[in-house]
Image (spheres, grey):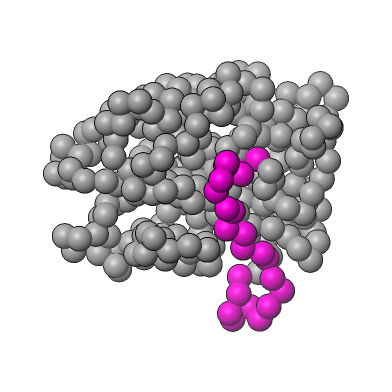
């Protein structure tokens, strides 16, 4: 349909464009045009370089598809930081990229405590071993992973995002999940909890997270979090608790429902 705003999908770290399969089916069903930005070939690059690649990609897609108006950008996890770095740091003043909404699913907007833990000399190895094959690849070395290093809370990239500030011409949405019933199966590798860095700079486990990214890492100034709690409701009506964890956010039907609401009703408030 000619009145549908096109969508760009940006996957996260150690992921791929296939995570958007279920959402793509909904987009196609509603006649919403879309494209998937694939940065799997840039796994040895830092976040600013991947953002520069997204810059070129958006320019090329607009020319190819004849899209001259605003776009909606939907991101999973670290993909949100990639898009934000482009829009706020690289393009913040020029605003050459017209974006209506930026929708982040479980984003580490303020840096990732888990990325910091990976590099912790005392805890890092145990954490990596526990998540190998689940969230981190075999042979993962955090010191050589530029993207992981870039989202450590004290890194220059995160500081640049904080200093740049949000763009007033973009509506920001942040969708997160939580484990209110303390179900270990929500994210069994951490017994249903999420590691975060508290205000005192110490690590602590919280239920206010998705197993990988805590809510305090997702918050943006002046933007309310959309919190979808994992529930033990009937399986025929609600996903099981494990479907609310970080790994399944792009596939969770309730998350997809919320995304579709915003795409069809961009002025809607939650």
Residue 241 x, y percent position in the rendering: 68, 65
Q: Is residue 26 left or right of residue 222?
A: left
Q: Nearer the viewer, residue 21 or 133?
A: 21
The structure residue drawn at horizontal position 81% and vertical position 30%, both measured from the top left corner, is: 201
On the rendered image, what quadrant is the N terminus found in?
A: bottom left
Q: Is residue 265 left or right of residue 219?
A: left
Is 99 colored magenta in this rendering?
no
Magenta-highlighted residues: 217-239
> Residue 221's quadrant in the figure?
top right
The structure residue drawn at horizontal position 39% and vertical position 32%, both measured from the top left corner, is: 87
The structure residue drawn at horizontal position 60% and vertical position 39%, both measured from the top left corner, is: 108
Residue 144 x, y percent position in the rendering: 60, 18
Is 224 colored magenta in this rendering?
yes
Q: Nearer the viewer, residue 160 or 148?
A: 160
Location of residue 27 with respect to 204 vertically, above or below: below
Location of residue 9 with respect to 198 vertically, above or below: below
Q: Nearer the viewer, residue 168 or 182?
A: 168
């Amino acid at each position: 349909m000619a009145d549908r705003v096109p969508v760009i999908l940006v996957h996260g770290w150690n992921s791929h464009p296939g995570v958007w399969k279920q959402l793509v089916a909904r987009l196609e069903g509603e006649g919403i045009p879309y494209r998937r930005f694939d940065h799997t070939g840039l796994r040895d690059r830092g976040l600013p370089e991947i953002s520069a690649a997204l810059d070129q990609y958006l320019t090329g897609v607009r020319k190819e598809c004849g899209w001259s108006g605003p776009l909606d950008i939907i991101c999973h996890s670290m993909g949100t930081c990639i898009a934000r770095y482009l829009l706020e740091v690289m393009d913040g003043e020029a605003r050459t990229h017209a974006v209506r909404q930026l929708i982040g699913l479980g984003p580490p907007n303020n840096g990732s405590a888990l990325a910091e833990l990976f590099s912790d000399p005392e805890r890092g190895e145990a954490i990596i071993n526990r998540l190998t094959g689940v969230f981190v690849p075999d042979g993962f070395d955090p010191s050589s992973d530029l993207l992981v290093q870039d989202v450590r809370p004290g890194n220059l990239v995160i500081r640049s995002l904080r200093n740049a500030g949000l763009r007033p011409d973009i509506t920001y949405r942040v969708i997160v999940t939580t484990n209110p019933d303390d179900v270990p199966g929500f994210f069994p590798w951490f017994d249903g909890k999420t590691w975060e860095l508290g205000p005192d700079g110490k690590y602590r486990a919280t239920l206010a997270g998705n197993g990988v990214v805590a809510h305090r890492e997702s918050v943006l100034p002046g933007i309310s979090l959309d919190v979808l709690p994992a529930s033990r409701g009937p399986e025929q009506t609600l996903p099981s608790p494990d479907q609310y964890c970080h790994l399944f956010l792009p596939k969770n039907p309730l998350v997809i429902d919320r995304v579709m609401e915003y795409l069809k009703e961009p002025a809607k408030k939650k």
